[in-house]
Amino acid sequence: MLVTTESFSQLIHEATSEAMFLTMAESFKILADPTRLKILALLFTETLSVGEIAEHLVVSQSAVSHQLRLLRNLNIVRYRKQGREVYYDLADDHVRDILQRTFEHILHD
Amino acid sequence: MLVTTESFSQLIHEATSEAMFLTMAESFKILADPTRLKILALLFTETLSVGEIAEHLVVSQSAVSHQLRLLRNLNIVRYRKQGREVYYDLADDHVRDILQRTFEHILHD
DNA sequence: TTGATATATGAGCATATATTCATATGTATT
DNA sequence: AATACATATGAATATATGCTCATATATCAA
């Protein structure tokens, strides 16, 4: 990424900052929903089909599918078709890392 | 916090998880807005008055004040009245840490 | 006291978003 | 081919949220 800034606090003084703040906000928005967090928690260690995800959570198949599309478009999950099932797993280790860290933060409060 | 879970992925199997996912989502929501991120970036190193914040950003005094109230209620910023000015600074090192780390994640993409 | 300045706040508005419902698409089974 | 099953998707709805505008409150200056 074409940014010279090295710290968050420095960002506010840079010309490129507007786009960066938007990007950061978009990133956090992904994690700002309980259903998506639950889906990501399920996919944290396992690969699961849409139906299995919907079954584990108390969420309709449609709602899960809508959220998965969102996560797919953002390259946060990957999918693999197998027959009529579609299996999803995490595509992004950054997200994995952020989730783990933030979770620890919340625990230590 | 009264949770036995040690990892994010484990959380999905716990009885306490519903509340925890809501809490995590609420935490991320705070950071899911560019204006709030900019305010937090400004307060990352400095203490500033409401007027100074509004001046640095291109946001109205009212909008800044509304967001500061939100951050105040969540104990993310502290404030100190001094005459007619009110000076704000960061109250929470967790937030500082998460911001810095996430920023680094985005940079390294 | 009067006027100016700094901040806070409620109401209203516009927009975004999560879900549901109905249905489309694709695949397996008979 | 017909039916059942798994997933995707568009439209509609309900709710949340960020901002503006008007105004309230508090403090300083004259």
Image: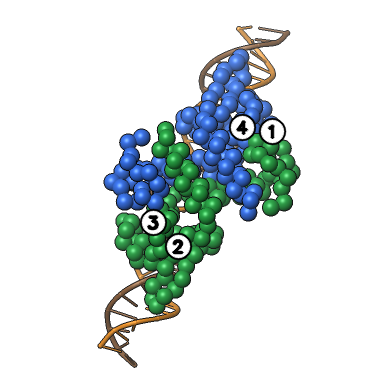
Chain colours: A green, B blue, C orange, D brown
Chain hosting mark 1: B
Q: Can residue B58 be seen here?
A: no
**What's the mark number on residue B11?**
none
Callouts 4 and 3 in the same chain: no
Left or right of A17 in this view: A30: left
Q: Are marks 4 and 2 in contact (CB under 8 Å)?
A: no
Q: Nearer the viewer, residue A48 or B66?
A: A48
Q: What's the CA distance linking mark 2 and mark 3?
A: 9 Å
Percent position of residue A16, x then y: 71, 46
Q: Nearer the viewer, mark 4 or mark 2?
A: 2
Rendered residue at 53%/44% (across/down): B32
Chain hosting mark 3: A
Left or right of B84 in this view: A107: left
Task: Name the residue type under label 3.
Answer: Leu
Task: Name the residue type under label 2.
Answer: Asp
**Quarter holding the C terminus of chain A?**
top left
Rendered residue at 42%/68% (across/down): A87
Residue at which label 4 appears: B44
Callouts 1 and 3 in the same chain: no
Say which label, 4 or 1, has the lower sequence index: 4
Chain hosting mark 4: B
Circle 4 sits in a helix, a strand or a loop, which is it?
A: loop
Circle 1 sits in a helix, a strand or a loop, which is it?
A: helix
Q: Are marks 4 and 3 in contact (CB under 8 Å)?
A: no
Residue at which label 1 appears: B56
Please rate how many residues cluster around mark 4, counting C-alpha atoms within 10 Å: few if below 14, some from 14 to 19, many from 20.
many
